[in-house]
Amino acid sequence: MTTINRIFICFILISINTIAQKQQKLSFQVVPLGVKGGIDEKNLSAYLLAPINTKDYICLDAGTINSGIEKAIENKVFKVPTSKVLRKYIKGYLISHAHLDHVSGLIINSPADSSKTVYATQKCMEMMETHYFNDQTWANFGDEGPGFHIKRYHFQTLNIGEETPITNTAMTVKAFPLSHVNPYESTAFLISNKDNYVLYLGDTGPDVVEKSNNLKELWTAVAPLVQNKQLKGIFIEVSFPNEQPDQFLFGHLTPKYLMDELHKLEKLAGQNSLNGFKIVITHLKPPAQNIVKIKEQLKTQNDLGLQFIFPEQGKDFEL
């Protein structure tokens, strides 16, 4: 064997090993169907999450569904019709809270959807059954609540802190309470794929403003996963720039309050534990100049070495 051949074989083996290591580190694929908070009804909170190299997606909130799938098809993330993604690829929905910008896509698309499970905590589920799927505002596509039950959706109530299998996937979920204008409840979802995890937070205010310990307790629960590098990323909202007064936060975060909270997480997980850690920023509210300001403030205040991801509708990424 010539020296050139040996070098070529070594190069191939190194490349294969590098690719294998990369695939081993990446555990989830994400397709944002909607990324904003506020008034853009075609681009509201909804994120498809699946174990890597599968089509077994759970939808994290459901503000926008159809328009987001169409964007993903335009970007060649999906090469099948919109109806197939909706009916076959999306295995269920995790709803953090019942505000319309997090559930409107679920409601509007329900007549075209297939049978699957909608997961939410008790208060959230009660609100959806009472105000939306109540056979008056909208037909009851569920199997509980008022009126005639179409039974397209199985409404499954999540118990706080209890691990629940996500039907037709290899994933499980554990719910944690959040405060979104205290005492209104939102939810954080800790999703597992074998020994790897992603944390998704619905709308939340900072503990200091909300007079709550919900985020502190959440950080305490996930700190060991950060230490062990099992937590692959956190989806968390930043709705307003730092200039927004506390009395007008309405249960949301600013860059300053996000960094304050992540410093608390780092203190629990260990010094430099968040260096290079992926933070997916969700729920940025228009106008455009506010979004630009939020991004600039996060970059300026990032003293933890975080890797901020600003998702774009219909463009996939991996964690």
Image: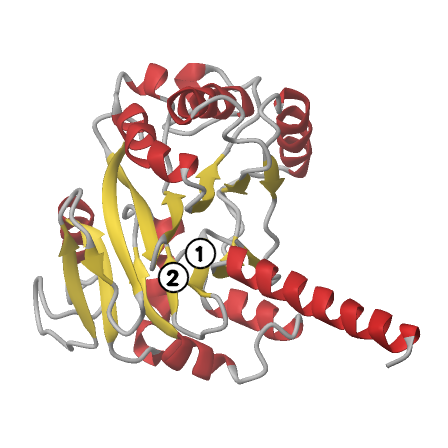
The percent coordinates of residue 169 (x first, y second) are: 31, 70
The percent coordinates of residue 235 (x first, y second) are: 46, 43
Circle count: 2
User: Is 3 placed left or right of 154 in the picture?
Assistant: right
Q: Residue at x 61, y 21 (%)?
A: 303
**Front residue of 4 and 35:** 4
Q: Which residue is mark 2?
A: 59
Q: Residues within 10 Å of mark 2 (few under 14, many from 20)?
A: many
Q: Residues within 10 Å of mark 1 (few under 14, many from 20)?
A: many
Callout 1–callout 2 Cβ contact below 8 Å: yes
Q: Which mark is first along the chain, 2 or 1?
A: 1
Evaluate whether residue 113 shows in this view. yes
Q: Is residue 162 above or below residue 284?
A: below
Q: Which mark is residue 213?
A: none
Q: CA distance from mark 1 to mark 2?
A: 6 Å
Q: Which residue is mark 1?
A: 46
Q: Residue at x 53, y 67 (%)?
A: 67
User: Is 9 placed left or right of 160 in the picture?
Assistant: right
